[in-house]
Image: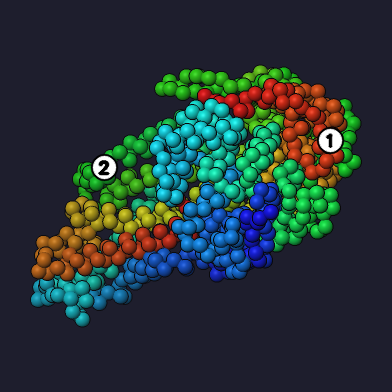
């Protein structure tokens, strides 16, 4: 087998603000013709720098290649002149970008944006094709990514396509000029798990059909297991382990690889941690709640449309529960959280917290001492311009805490979330993601609430950090007898964290019950489809996932691949 | 390169402030701007001590020495009544900076407050404030200022009022846009969940996030206010003689162009110098604080 891409002893450093640091240390890796290789690493491990160096988009300066070489098909990429290197873009090496929402220009049609790719590469390669020929080529390529209505897709604007379709178009764009090496940067991570599953399957088929080589860059071990023949594990700019997929997953050697594997919450098997809790004292009662949003437009601000975000939801959360609300984007789970927090009023129905109606009770001091929230992204939920201590003091000030006791309470809170007291004077940007989320948890706990709404509290964090935050949440719940409402799309985490789960689909709760019942005997087709789509890291788990036929799946997920508008 | 940091260790190395200072120092134009602004302030502050002939700032006349070209005694020459132009420029900076402080001292807080209210409350408050701002923005500024100073009597205070009435609108627009963006951030909702009052959210949560943009805008504004004041004086609607004002000096000097060029050119250069300084400083701050205006 011939080696297509060969990176040898690559060292890259960055100089900025008068400081210099090396971010890649002697990285060597290769990709053979027709091989699927994965590069795994947490954020900041240097995997994106590696990718950008290969495709030649690393900003230099501040970046600098200090040592090493990259051979592509016998040519030394780093020594090629810019024109020769440009010729390889798309034709030799092509890339599928991560975010299907941000990778398009919203004001140009898909057709125009795809046509540009072909036109400019034709110019670079000195060919010329007529517009009609190019369009035929575009439609053919779209067919390869299973978008049959090529003409319609080409005439659409990016906003008219669903996330999954956009990702498919991105893949099609990467294939337009018949590359030999496809680099995929976290494909599908921005998408729902069922859509991601489709995209991964598609990439696998394409690699086989077109005889491509694939370099997959990801942090998700489950995805790697599905998509790779060989794996490289990267930690802090160093390749710490490499091997065949089976070798890495069956017998990881390096402690870092093992740590990564252990941190992934298992979906099935003996490592699963089942949280049980018995209580019949209801604290949150959601009674037939419906929330409609109205879209208004026109000169007179008339109601022009109605959208039902939450539809007739009835749930009861008992004292001490960790109640999971699962669902994909647009399922209404965040709206439900806002209704529980009294930030929105339900169109119909009633929500009771410890027997009191949220509609009349929200906004009072007692209400705030009852329920608080931890947001998904601590980068946004903490004010970037205020010191940590000041932010922790806000809920205290507004629940009538004595001014003189606040500093003491603030350091007590930092202690509670295992952060040093000195952090009170720091600003959020000085903290890491995990630490910021700890501050956000401390803020929510500052007024000793009895219920905590956790809105995807770990989805912005790396898996290793996620594990520590989850442990902290477990400890706090024990210490303060808290009730959690945990909103997430991550079912593997939910399996290990919650004792009861409700699954939402398009505003409705399709299934609810104890965690073991939902995961071991899922009743609703959607729950089964969700579970079957989760990328897991062992064969045993794969075997235990519910089997869902294509037709069954297509039925519940019908809207995902349909054209909107 | 925060993306390259170890994800769960605190950011080591430079603090944001150090990084900003580094960015500023590495920008030679910004440093020059800061230097120029500092010299203008110092010149205005110590004008009585620095001026070769402080009495030139008043109604002093010396007809024997009128229209003297630049020389060692009068580095910028003398004007039509024999006053030293350099001395008058130094005192003129006092008027210009006074104008800047007076105008921005009122217009900025007012504009920022309206912007905050419009962005935060939305709805009718927003419609009222922003449409009124739009109306004010639609008026041609010079014509408006002319009308105001013509109706009231032409003097420094009225010129200041006229400029202030027009100036706040830009700050309202700027802050409104920033606040609208910040309203999507979770920290605003988090503060509301924590029970924070409107005034807490407005002034303690949102306002600090507007500071850097306002700082940049102010430093850029300062130059334009000086220019606007000079334009009004040039038209005879600002500072009245004999108080030295750069705009008036250019106006009187222009009658003697081109033979006795220094009488118009020297105060003109002084205006240019100050505006250049403020603009370079503003651009430098913008790069350093990374704001978009």
In three-dimensional space, the C-alpha distance between marks 1 and 2, rounded to whole angstroms, equals: 74 Å
Q: Nearer the viewer, residue A183 or B10?
A: A183
The residue under the point 75% across, 25% down is A549
The subunit carrying tag 2 is: B
Q: Secondary structure at mark 2?
A: loop
The residue under the point 71% across, 22% down is A551
- Residue A103 location in percent, x, y? 53, 42
Position of the N terminus of chain B, as image quadrant, is: bottom right
Q: Nearer the viewer, residue A137 or B192?
A: A137
**What residue is shown with label 1?**
A543
- Residue A306 location in percent, x, y? 56, 20
The subunit carrying tag 1 is: A
- Residue B230 location in percent, x, y? 25, 57
Whether residue A528 sits left or right of residue B191 in the image: it is right
The residue under the point 68% across, 24% down is A554
Q: Is residue A20 above or below residue A179?
A: below
Q: Are marks 1 and 2 in contact (CB under 8 Å)?
A: no
Q: Is residue B241 above or below residue A459?
A: below
Whether residue A218 sits left or right of residue B227 in the image: it is right
**What residue is shown with label 2?**
B140
Displayed quadrant of residue A101: top right
Q: Secondary structure at mark 1?
A: helix
Q: Check the image and name the residue furthest to the bottom.
A: B72
Displayed quadrant of residue A451: top right
């Amino acid at each position: 087998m011939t080696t297509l891409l060969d990176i040898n002893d690559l060292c890259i450093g960055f100089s900025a603000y008068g400081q210099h640091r090396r971010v890649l240390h002697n990285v060597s890796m290769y990709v053979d013709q027709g091989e699927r290789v994965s590069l795994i690493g947490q954020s900041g491990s240097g995997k994106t720098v590696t990718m950008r160096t290969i495709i030649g988009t690393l900003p230099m300066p501040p970046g600098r290649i200090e040592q090493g070489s990259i051979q592509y098909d016998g040519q030394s990429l780093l020594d090629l002149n810019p024109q020769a290197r440009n010729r390889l873009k798309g034709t030799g090496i092509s890339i599928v970008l991560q975010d299907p929402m941000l990778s398009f220009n919203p004001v140009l049609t898909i057709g125009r944006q795809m046509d540009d790719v072909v036109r400019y590469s034709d110019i670079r390669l000195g060919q010329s094709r007529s517009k009609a020929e190019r369009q035929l080529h575009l439609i053919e390529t779209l067919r390869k990514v299973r978008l049959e209505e090529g003409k319609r897709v080409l005439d659409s604007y990016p906003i008219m396509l669903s996330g999954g379709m956009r990702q498919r178009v991105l893949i099609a764009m990467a294939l337009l000029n018949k590359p030999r090496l496809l680099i995929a940067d976290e494909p599908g991570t921005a998408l729902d798990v069922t859509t991601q599953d489709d995209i991964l399957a598609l990439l696998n088929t394409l690699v086989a059909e077109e005889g491509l080589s694939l370099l997959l860059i990801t942090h998700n071990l489950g995805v790697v297991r599905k998509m790779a023949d060989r794996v490289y594990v990267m930690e802090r700019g160093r390749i710490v382990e490499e091997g065949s997929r089976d070798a890495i997953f069956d017998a990881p050697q390096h402690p870092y690889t093992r740590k990564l594997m252990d941190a992934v919450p298992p979906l099935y098997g003996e490592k699963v941690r089942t949280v049980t809790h018995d209580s019949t004292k209801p604290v949150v009662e959601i009674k037939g709640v419906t929330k409609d949003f109205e879209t208004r437009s026109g000169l007179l601000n008339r109601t022009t449309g109605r959208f039902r975000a939450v539809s007739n939801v009835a749930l009861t959360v008992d004292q001490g529960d960790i109640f999971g609300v699962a669902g994909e984007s647009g399922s209404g789970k965040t709206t439900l959280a806002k209704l529980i927090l009294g930030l929105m009023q339900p169109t119909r129905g009633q929500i009771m917290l410890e027997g009191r109606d949220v509609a009349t009770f929200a906004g009072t001091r007692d209400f705030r001492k009852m329920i608080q929230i931890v947001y998904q992204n601590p980068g946004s939920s903490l004010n970037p311009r205020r010191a940590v201590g000041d932010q922790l003091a806000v809920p205290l000030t507004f629940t009538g805490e004595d001014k003189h006791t606040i500093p003491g309470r603030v350091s007590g809170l930092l202690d509670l979330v295992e952060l040093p007291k000195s952090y009170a004077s720091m600003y959020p940007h000085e903290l890491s993601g995990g630490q910021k989320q700890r501050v956000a948890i401390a803020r929510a706990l500052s007024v000793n609430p009895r219920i905590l709404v956790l809105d995807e509290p770990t989805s912005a964090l790396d898996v290793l950090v996620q594990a520590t935050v989850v442990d902290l949440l477990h400890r706090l719940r024990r210490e303060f007898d808290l009730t959690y409402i945990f909103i997430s799309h991550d079912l593997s985490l939910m399996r290990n964290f919650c004792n009861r789960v409700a699954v939402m689909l398009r505003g409705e709760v399709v299934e609810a019950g104890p965690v073991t019942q939902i995961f071991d005997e899922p009743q609703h087709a959607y729950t089964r489809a969700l579970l079957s789509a989760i990328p897991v890291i062992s064969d045993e788990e794969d075997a235990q996932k519910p089997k869902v036929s294509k037709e069954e799946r297509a039925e519940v997920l019908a809207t995902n691949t349909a054209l909107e508008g | 390169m925060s993306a390259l940091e170890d994800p769960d260790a605190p950011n080591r190395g430079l603090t944001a402030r150090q990084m900003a200072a580094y960015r500023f120092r590495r920008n030679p134009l910004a440093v020059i701007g800061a230097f120029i602004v500092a010299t203008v302030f110092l010149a205005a502050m110590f004008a009585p001590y620095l001026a070769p002939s402080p009495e030139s700032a008043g109604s002093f006349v010396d007809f024997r020495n009128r229209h003297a070209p630049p020389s060692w005694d009068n580095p910028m020459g003398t004007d039509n009544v024999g006053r030293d132009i350099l001395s008058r420029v130094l005192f003129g900076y006092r008027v210009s900076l006074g104008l800047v402080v007076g105008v921005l001292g009122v217009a900025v807080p007012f504009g920022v407050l309206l912007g905050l209210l419009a962005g935060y409350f939305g709805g009718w408050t927003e419609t009222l404030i922003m449409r009124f701002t739009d109306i004010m923005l639609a008026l041609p500024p010079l014509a408006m200022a002319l009308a105001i100073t013509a109706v009231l009597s032409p003097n420094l205070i009225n010129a200041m009022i006229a400029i202030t009435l027009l100036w706040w609108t830009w700050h309202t627009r700027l802050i409104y846009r920033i606040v609208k963006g910040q309203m999507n951030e979770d920290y605003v909702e988090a503060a509301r969940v924590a029970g924070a009052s409107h005034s807490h959210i407005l002034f303690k949560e949102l306002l600090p996030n507007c500071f850097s943009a306002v700082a940049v805008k102010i430093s850029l504004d300062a130059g334009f206010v000086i220019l606007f004041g000079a334009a009004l004086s040039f038209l005879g609607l600002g500072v009245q003689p004999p108080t030295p004002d750069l705009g008036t000096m250019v106006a009187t000097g222009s009658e003697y162009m081109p033979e006795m060029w220094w009488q118009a050119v020297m105060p003109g250069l002084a205006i240019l110098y100050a505006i250049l300084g403020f603009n370079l400083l503003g651009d430098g701050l913008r790069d350093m604080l990374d704001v978009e205006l």
